Image: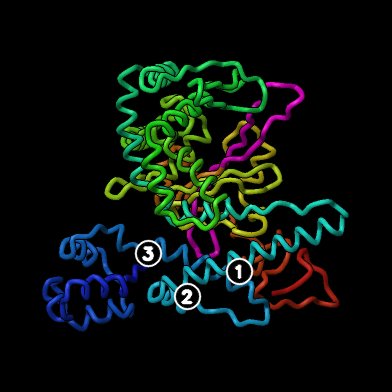
């Protein structure tokens, strides 16, 4: 079912910015003033026909009027408000929607304050735990990584200036051939950088600017070496653009700036070896078969899945896809979503989600039709991967990759072939702490914003009622 689109505040802002009265704007849109007034007050949703007319009259893209970002903010608000405790009455979604639409700046500031509160609370708990264990120091805070994660989240995981510059750079590199050899030749000809393969420790890449020498780990697979070469080319070629993006990001801590610089350089490297237009066209042609795309672009499965979640260029958007990487303990180490799919900011993810099952099914793709509490269904694909260390004494790194799309787009993924997409779906959630479901037998603990009762004379699988 298509989600109703309410764009009242955005439409009113566009009208007032042009100095148009309600009646004049209604005439240009071909509707009555009363109908336009109802749209602006969010009493009526906008229809596809009116949305098309709006884009023509105001000269804006349909994507700029979409409420996907508002939905993300609303979900973040609900999770933040859940920390008020079970005694506090739940805030209706209608109020959250109005707040996100009418006071977006205030809402963002509130979410920033809540994240700061959570980080301080986590640090306090870590300190208490360290003291109780008589350790010499408390666990380090991941605040810079969380700040950078939020930056990419609110940029929809697409950085236009970096992406387009990397795409243009790819055309120059492709003039020298393809694969690892072309990247090495480009480094030598453009920057007089020599590449050697001599590292055997856990360092993947080491650059010596004085000697203009790049050392790569000979034990790394070809896809990893190609990515490290692309990273070095990106930092040398696009450093100024990356610094401009960092300045515009206005990150709070110096550590976050350093982390984000690496993140933007990684982004540029991926865009260099998987240029936007060619990559998006290939994704459509092979129906997002990540194994075939990995062969086409000399990339790893993780690199391909991550890149698929970045296809958000205005006017050339790809299939809206989410991507997540988790370790075998369930810790989410990467998460990006161009869909309405939500990831838990704090605590564990839903145990019914197939990324957990994939741990016990190495080197196999697991496919699941899952439904979130908001009723939206997704095609979820999961695959475990192993990154070899190349040495007996160094343990391999093991991860689970998860990606998928809303079920309305399932036919565009090869993984939907043979599935009954109209059949029953796994009932999953974001995490137990904010899950709305009353009948989940896998629930680990009650949601923090709901009251519970514990029956004295009966015992079900879950020992409490919400």
> How far apart are labels 2 and 1 at the CA level?
16 Å
In 3D space, how far apart are the residues under numbered discs 2 and 3 (Cα atoms)?
Answer: 13 Å
Image position of 21 (left or right of 383): left
What residue sits right under mark 1 in the picture?
A: 436
Q: Which mark is residue 67?
A: 3
Q: Which residue is pictured at 58% across the width and 64% down the height?
A: 115
Q: Residue under circle 2?
A: 96
Q: In front here: 290 or 74?
A: 74
Residue 178 appears anywhere in the view: yes
- Mark 2: give few (<14), some (14-19) or many (20+) Cα within 10 Å: some
Label 1, residues with CA under 10 Å away: few <14, some 14-19, many ≥20: some
In the displayed structure, 156 sits above or below 18; it is above
Q: Find out whether residue 377 is within the magenta segment.
A: yes
Task: Check disc 2 and report its element: helix, strand or loop.
Answer: helix
| Tag 1 and tag 3, C-beta contact below 8 Å | no
Give the residue displayed 16% in from the left and 61% down from the top: 56
Q: Quadrant of the C terminus?
A: bottom right
**Whole-percent x, y for residue 148 in the image:** 52, 52
**Residue depth check, mark 2 versus mark 1: number of the one nearer the observer:** 2
| First along the sequence among labels 2 and 1 | 2
Residue at figure coordinates x 23%, y 70% from the top left:
14
Element on which disc 1 rests: loop
Label 1, label 3: how far apart the Cα atoms are: 22 Å
Badges 2 and 1: C-beta atoms under 8 Å apart? no
Q: Where are the magenta residues, as a range?
A: 372-401
Residue 218 point in image, percent of width and height: 59, 18
Q: Earlier in the sequence, mark 1 or mark 3?
A: 3
Q: Position of residue 41 (x, y in %)?
A: 31, 80
| Mark sitting earlier along the chain (2/3) | 3
């Amino acid at each position: 079912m298509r989600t109703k689109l309410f764009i009242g505040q955005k439409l009113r802002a566009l009208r007032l910015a042009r100095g148009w009265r309600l009646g004049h704007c209604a005439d240009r849109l071909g509707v009555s003033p009363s109908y336009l007034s109802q749209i602006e007050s969010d009493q009526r949703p906008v229809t596809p026909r009116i949305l098309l007319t709006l884009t023509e009259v105001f000269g804006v893209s349909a994507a700029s009027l979409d409420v996907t970002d508002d939905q993300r903010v609303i979900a973040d608000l609900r999770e933040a408000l859940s920390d008020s405790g079970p005694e506090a009455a739940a805030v209706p979604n209608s109020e959250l929607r109005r707040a996100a639409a009418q006071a977006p700046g205030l809402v963002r500031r509130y979410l920033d304050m809540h994240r700061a509160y959570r980080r301080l609370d986590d640090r306090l708990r870590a300190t208490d735990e360290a003291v109780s264990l008589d350790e010499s120091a408390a666990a380090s805070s991941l605040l810079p990584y969380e700040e950078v994660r939020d930056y990419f989240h609110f940029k929809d995981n697409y950085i236009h200036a970096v992406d387009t510059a990397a795409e243009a750079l790819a055309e120059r590199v492709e003039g020298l051939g393809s694969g690892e050899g072309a990247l090495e030749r480009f480094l030598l000809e453009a920057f007089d950088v020599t590449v050697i393969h001599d590292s055997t420790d856990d360092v993947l890449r080491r650059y010596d600017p004085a000697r203009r020498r790049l050392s790569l780990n000979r034990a790394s697979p070809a896809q990893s070496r190609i990515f490290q070469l692309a990273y070095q080319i990106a930092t040398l070629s696009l450093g100024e653009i990356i610094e401009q993006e960092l300045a515009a990001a206005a990150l709070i801590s110096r550590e976050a700036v350093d982390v984000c610089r690496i993140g933007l350089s990684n982004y540029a490297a991926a865009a260099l070896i998987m240029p936007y237009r060619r990559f998006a066209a290939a994704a459509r042609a092979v129906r997002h078969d990540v194994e075939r795309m990995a062969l086409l672009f000399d990339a790893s499965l993780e690199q391909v899945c991550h890149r698929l979640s970045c296809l958000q260029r205005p006017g050339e958007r790809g299939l809206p896809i989410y991507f997540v990487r988790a370790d075998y303990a369930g810790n989410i180490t990467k998460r990006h979503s161009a869909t309405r799919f939500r990831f838990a900011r704090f605590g564990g993810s839903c145990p019914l989600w197939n990324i957990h099952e994939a741990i016990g099914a190495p080197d196999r793709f697991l496919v699941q039709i899952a439904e979130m509490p908001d009723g939206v269904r997704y095609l979820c694909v999961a695959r475990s991967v192993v990154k070899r260390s190349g040495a007996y004494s160094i343990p391999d790194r093991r991860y689970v990759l998860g990606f998928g799309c809303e079920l309305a787009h399932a036919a565009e993924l090869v993984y939907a072939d043979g599935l009954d997409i109209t059949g029953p779906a796994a009932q999953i959630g974001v995490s137990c702490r904010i899950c709305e479901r009353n009948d989940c037998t896998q629930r680990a603990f009650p949601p923090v914003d709901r009251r519970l009762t514990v029956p004295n004379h009966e015992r079900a699988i879950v020992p409490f009622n919400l």
